[in-house]
Image (tube, helix red, strand yellow):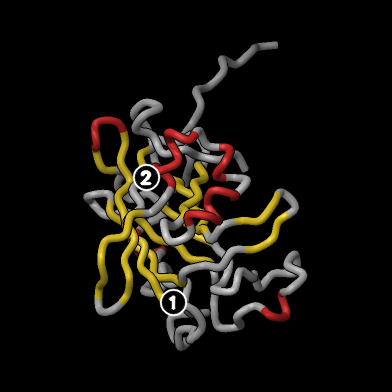
Amino acid sequence: MDMLSPSSQHTIGPFFPRTFFTDGDNDLTRLNAEARPTTRGEPILIQGRVTKEGGFPCINMILEAWQADAAGRFNHPADPEQHLADPDFLGWGRAWTDAEGHYEFRTLLPGGYDDPAGRRAPHVNLTVMGAGLMRRVLATLFFPDFEDANAADPMLNLVPEARRAKIVAVPEGERDGVRVFRFDIHLRGGVEEETPFFED
């Protein structure tokens, strides 16, 4: 019997064309592009850049974001307070990076919630997929508004203290009356530069 030589590992694929995305895919504040945005909570913008070693942009990367609503609830059967969740808040969205590696999400400032591991600080979960990655990577974005909650968050406390600032978004003023937070993601570049990622 002939033995085949092992093939090399492949990166994530297939990759999606721009036509796969539609306007509003990166807006978590509404159920679909035609729906009115929720009126609960504070709308915010999250924007940033995805780069690799040397600061080179990661082009056409897919980012998925999911989070609790402004009161810390999920419209999901696993949440015992699903019946109280914001019915107009989608809580999930998808963005992609442009030629310079930039991405943007419109969402709400999330609430914290109780978890079996402990009280979770307000945060947004991000998945990054694309060329050059063997598997998706998972990052969690925290907010500087909640220092006490961040200090007690069980997931944030898994990150070495010297690297925690890498997963706290940076305020960048306002746009059209909406607060903007910057969250850059560095996929490679050594421990000091790389964004801390979590296992799924």
Q: Residue at x 61, y 69 (%)?
A: 72
Tag 2: Cα neighbours inside 10 Å, few (<14), some, or many (≥20)? many
Quadrant (top left, top right, bottom left, bottom right) of the N terminus? top right
Q: Is residue 170 left or right of residue 93?
A: left
Query: Residue 52 at what x, y percent from top left?
Result: 31, 36
- Say what amino acid the circle numbered 1 marks: Glu
- Pick whichever, 159 or 23, lies toward us: 159
Q: Quadrant of residue 51?
A: top left
- Say what amino acid the circle numbered 2 marks: Ile
Q: Which mark is residue 42?
A: 1
Query: Residue 129 at what x, y percent from top left?
Result: 45, 46
| Comes first in the chain, label 2 or label 1 | 1
Question: Mark 2–mark 1 contact, CB under 8 Å?
Answer: no
Q: Which mark's residue is nearer the viewer, 2 or 1?
A: 1
Query: Residue 34 at what x, y percent from top left?
Result: 44, 86
Q: Residue at x 55, y 44 (%)?
A: 156
Tag 1: Cα neighbours inside 10 Å, few (<14), some, or many (≥20)? some
The residue wearing badge 2 is 185
- Pick whichever, 135 or 106, lies toward us: 106
In the rendered image of this protein, does residue 83 appear above or below residue 134? below
Query: Residue 117 at what x, y percent from top left?
Result: 71, 48
